Amino acid sequence: MRWALVKVCLAVTAMVVIAFAVPLALVVKEMAGDRAFSDAERQAAMIGPTLSITTDRKELTRAVMSTEPGQEGHLAVHVPAADEPEHPALEIGTRRAPRKDVETVRKAGRASITAVRGGSVLLQPTALGSGDIAVVEVFVPEGEVSKGVTTAWLMLAGVGLALIVGSVAVADRLGVRMVEPAQRLAGAAQNLGEGRLGTRVPEEGPTELRSAAVAFNSMADQVVQLLANERELAADLSHRLRTPLTVLRLNAASLGEGPAAEQTRAAVEQLEHEVDTIIRTAREQRPQTQGVQTGAGAGCDVSEVIRERMGFWSALAEDEGREVRLAGVGRTVRIPVARPELAAALDALLGNVFRHTREGTAFAVDVHHSGDAVIVLVSDAGPGIADPKAALARGSSGRGGAAGALGSTGLGLDIVRRVAESTGGDLRIGRSVLGGTEVRIRIGLHLSAPERIGRGHGRRVGRQRRRTARRDAEAGSGRGGSGRGGGPCGGGPHH
């Protein structure tokens, strides 16, 4: 498109230059000839006063030689013979025109231009004092006729070339102004097709391309919204499955011994394994759609999401006699995390409290606001985690220990950590004021979208692959039990 515009402008400008330059060049040549013959007429007229006074050879010769053309041999005077014998015909200077042409001009009384070797001659009739007509011949060399024409033509050619070059440069700049927005639009469409859903196009350029950019951005926003709705639907489904599954597991543990009880616990364990497999598959596919979380419309109100999820879990806490405390959620603070992501992280932590602490164990959720981050504290009154570093190092669970015994999927802390690190924050485990485990989630507020996507991703790729293989092996081995709470590992939400 850019080169097509340049070619069109080049062709149009070249035609315009030719249309004006060729006639102008011919006019310049014609003006140069007119100037040369006008000078010849002026030089011929300088002899007129002398011829009107005398026809003496000496006087005429002196008058001819006093002129510049006469000195150069370019001026001649032809005086006809008089009736008296003492006044014969005179011919002063070098004659170049044929005698026939000279006689024709004398009889006609009109000036004439005749072509001769090396140029042209101007034959100018002049009246004598006796009433006869003399002819003054002025030779005009060919160089005088075309003097200055070549220079003028070169100047015209230079001006025409400059016009063509200037028009091509302007057309190229206009083409760039039109092509660059189109190229950005094409690149953005390619990026969107490759899964980078945070791609947007600057609304710049001509009106039509601005309209196309607006339409593209609107389409991308709708795609992001559709995917966000799909993830939210999946998150809601997992929430609805997790809560009754936790209740079933707790109830199955109290059935005692017997074939029916064992079958019930095995069915619950199998159901939990299938749900874990679905969640694990969803987590493994998430890096392909990370652009969604940083595109237009990403983000949520942390206080609103926490209030909603605490209301969800409070019903189960009341059934188990757990004391619940919620603080710091009265202020609206938007964080750069999609609503389903934050809800999934909270459910992972709160679900672990119910799964890995005894009934009646209190827990609390506190939200603290600072200038550049939001800190969410999930605390419980359980026995705590014996080795927090090991829990973080293995993602959420691992081989052996209480986590393995409890049949953890190894996704709890990994889900929470990914949410925190996607904003530039972090995840820490410590001892809570309630006596059990405290999980501290720091969520950054002012991290740009590219940093949120890239930070920590590269260094976690290999580790994530190892965790995935380990979790698949654990899931296949069928390890885990149905006991709850107590034991050496009954700590807070660490899976």
Image (cartoon, rainbow, N blue to C red):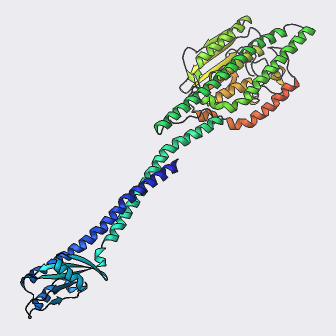
The quarter of the picture where residue 14 lies is bottom left
> Residue 173 in the image: x percent, y percent?
46, 49
- Name the residue: 17% across, 80% down: 106
- Decide which of 446, 387 is in the foreground and name it: 446
Q: Is residue 477 above or below residue 106?
A: above
Q: Is residue 481 above or below residue 174?
A: above
> Residue 167 in the image: x percent, y percent?
42, 53
- Name the residue: 38% across, 63% down: 158
The quarter of the picture where residue 298 lies is top right
The quarter of the picture where residue 352 lies is top right
Image position of 284 (left or right of 266) = left
Q: Is residue 77 above or below residue 419?
A: below
Instruction: Check the picture and name the quadrant holding the C terminus.
Output: top right
- Name the residue: 81% across, 18% down: 272
Of all residues shown, which one is farthest toward the right? Answer: 259
> Residue 438 in the image: x percent, y percent?
69, 20
- Decide which of 184, 152 is in the foreground and name it: 152
- Decide which of 85, 368 is in the foreground and name it: 85
Of all residues shown, which one is farthest toward the bottom? Answer: 86
- Decide which of 191, 487 is in the foreground and name it: 191
Q: Is residue 255 above or below residue 150?
A: above
- Name the residue: 65% across, 27% down: 420
Numbered circles on residues, count: 0
> Residue 213 in the image: x percent, y percent?
52, 34
Q: Is residue 112 visible?
A: yes
